[in-house]
């Protein structure tokens, strides 16, 4: 959206500048000029008054005809040659005709900056800094010069048109940027709030559309949470009933005479119990898993898990000394996530499992690497989907029920972390668990 609004701003500025330049340079026609030429009838009336008055009253006439819109001056003589028969361009002919008709053959001259411009009227600029004067000869050899002044505000605008245009475009861009920020700001806050599932961050002020969209997201979030809570309640109720029947079956399995069949039945019942526990954990971790601000000492917990696993015959290498590192999670959640990752590496890796930790950009990254065959790139996203397994068997000793990595991802998200899977160049799979570094919280 920023790029689109920026493009609109640039286009608007170009159009604004082009309009000002076109208005200043092209113009509709030479007859529609912004500078003002003296009115022909008024010029004729002033000249007639001078012709009928005695020379000793000329100063009084000058004061009478002078005002803030018109300047009248008496020249000692009219020394300009006038050729009434010379052909004039159309624009000059159109401008000269009213003067010829009003002055009835009196010699006159239209000039600016001391130069006759009547024959070159089409070449004159649309905006002129120099006044345009009409000079008319008197019978006694003197001449009357008249010019119609432009009002001071308009004159100042025309003289500073370039600066004014630049200021207008600049202010226009600033205002558009400000208006754009009123739109992009709420959109960015809304996007961050939706991505982090933070109802407090949803937009409550700003453009009406953004507020309505935030309300819609808030209502949708409430409905989704209601559905999740209902699903969890149903699962909890079903799990409770299942456990009741499992308990009965476990008691009844003791009456199976065949020891081998009794052992198989107990194993199946235990797997059913673990399946129920996994499903509940994936559905919604309970309060015992802690909140998002929980902290745990990584070194102690990881070393305990590694020692227990090594005692059971697993080959695990802890390649990083993480003494003093603390992550935002709980001991129970960390042990569950690490156990599921190690189980996955053991089942599909078959060889040594390596644990590597690093700190990066406010996060602690935990790598669990195995030496197995890896997974096809297009199927990597499927591994974290619930009840999804690349091995078709449903037996737990060959891969469980497909909730291990889903539980890791659910627990990581609970504490603001992430889980990502990738294939190693050396072969095997690498699980990348990112947890928030609690160092900033400790220092605070």
Image: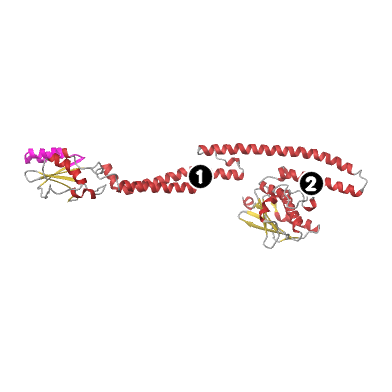
Residue range in magenta is: 42-71
**Dominant secondary-structure state across the stretch colored magenta:** helix
Q: Which residue is mark 2?
A: 274
Coordinates of residue 248 in the picture (x, y in percent): 86, 40
Q: Which residue is mark 1?
A: 184
Coordinates of residue 165 in the picture (x, y in percent): 34, 47
- Circle 2/circle 1 CB separation < 8 Å: no
Where is residue 108, by image quadrant? Answer: top left
The scheme the figure's colours follow is secondary structure
The tag on residue 111 is none
How far apart are the two marked residues, 2 and 1, measured between alpha carbons?
Answer: 49 Å
Could you tell me if residue 216 is visible in this image? yes
Where is residue 283, by image quadrant? Answer: top right
Mark closer to the chain start, 2 or 1: 1
Q: Is residue 431 left or right of residue 184?
A: right
Q: Nearer the viewer, residue 57 or 149?
A: 149
Residue, far right:
257
Circle 1 SS class? helix
Q: Residue at x 45, y 44 (%)?
A: 178
Q: Nearer the viewer, residue 56 or 74?
A: 74
Q: Is residue 106 magenta?
A: no
Q: Is residue 43 magenta?
A: yes
């Amino acid at each position: 959206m920023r790029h689109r609004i920026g493009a609109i701003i640039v286009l608007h500025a170009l159009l604004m500048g082009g309009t000002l330049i076109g208005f200043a340079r092209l113009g509709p026609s030479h007859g529609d000029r912004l500078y003002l030429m003296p009115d022909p009838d008024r010029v004729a009336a002033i000249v007639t008054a001078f012709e009928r008055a005695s020379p000793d009253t000329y100063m009084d006439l000058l004061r009478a005809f002078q005002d803030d819109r018109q300047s009248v001056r008496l020249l000692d003589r009219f020394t300009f040659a006038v050729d009434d028969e010379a052909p004039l361009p159309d624009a000059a002919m159109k401008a000269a005709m009213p003067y010829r008709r009003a002055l009835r053959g009196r010699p006159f001259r239209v000039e600016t900056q001391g130069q006759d411009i009547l024959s070159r009227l089409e070449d004159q600029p649309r905006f002129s800094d120099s006044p345009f004067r009409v000079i008319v000869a008197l019978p006694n050899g003197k001449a009357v010069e008249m010019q119609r002044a432009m009002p001071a505000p308009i004159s100042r605008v025309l003289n500073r048109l370039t600066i004014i245009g630049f200021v207008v475009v600049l202010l226009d861009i600033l205002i558009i940027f400000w208006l754009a920020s009123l739109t992009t700001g709420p959109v960015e806050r809304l996007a961050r709030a939706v991505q982090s599932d933070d109802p407090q961050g949803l937009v409550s002020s700003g453009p009406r559309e953004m507020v309505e969209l935030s309300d819609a997201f808030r209502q949708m979030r409430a409905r989704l949470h209601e559905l999740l809570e209902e699903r969890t309640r149903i699962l909890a109720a079903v799990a409770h009933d299942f456990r009741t029947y499992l308990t009965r079956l476990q008691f009844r399995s003791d009456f199976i005479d065949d020891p081998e069949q009794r052992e198989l039945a107990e194993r199946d019942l235990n797997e059913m119990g673990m399946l129920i526990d996994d499903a509940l954990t994936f559905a919604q971790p309970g309060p015992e898993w802690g909140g998002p601000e929980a902290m745990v000492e990584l070194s102690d917990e990881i070393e305990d898990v590694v020692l227990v696993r090594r005692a059971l015959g697993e080959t695990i290498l802890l390649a990083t000394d993480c003494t003093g590192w603390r992550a935002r999670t709980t001991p129970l959640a960390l042990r569950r996530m690490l156990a599921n990752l190690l189980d996955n590496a053991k089942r599909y890796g078959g060889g040594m499992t390596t644990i590597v930790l690093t700190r990066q950009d406010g996060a602690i990254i935990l790598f669990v690497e195995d030496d197995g065959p890896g997974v096809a790139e297009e199927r990597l996203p499927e591994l974290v989907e619930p009840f999804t397994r690349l091995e078709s068997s449903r037996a737990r000793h060959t891969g469980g029920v497909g909730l291990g990595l889903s539980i890791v991802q659910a627990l990581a998200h609970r504490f603001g972390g992430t889980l990502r899977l990738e294939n190693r160049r050396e072969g095997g799979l690498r699980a990348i668990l990112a947890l928030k570094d609690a160092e900033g919280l400790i220092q605070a």
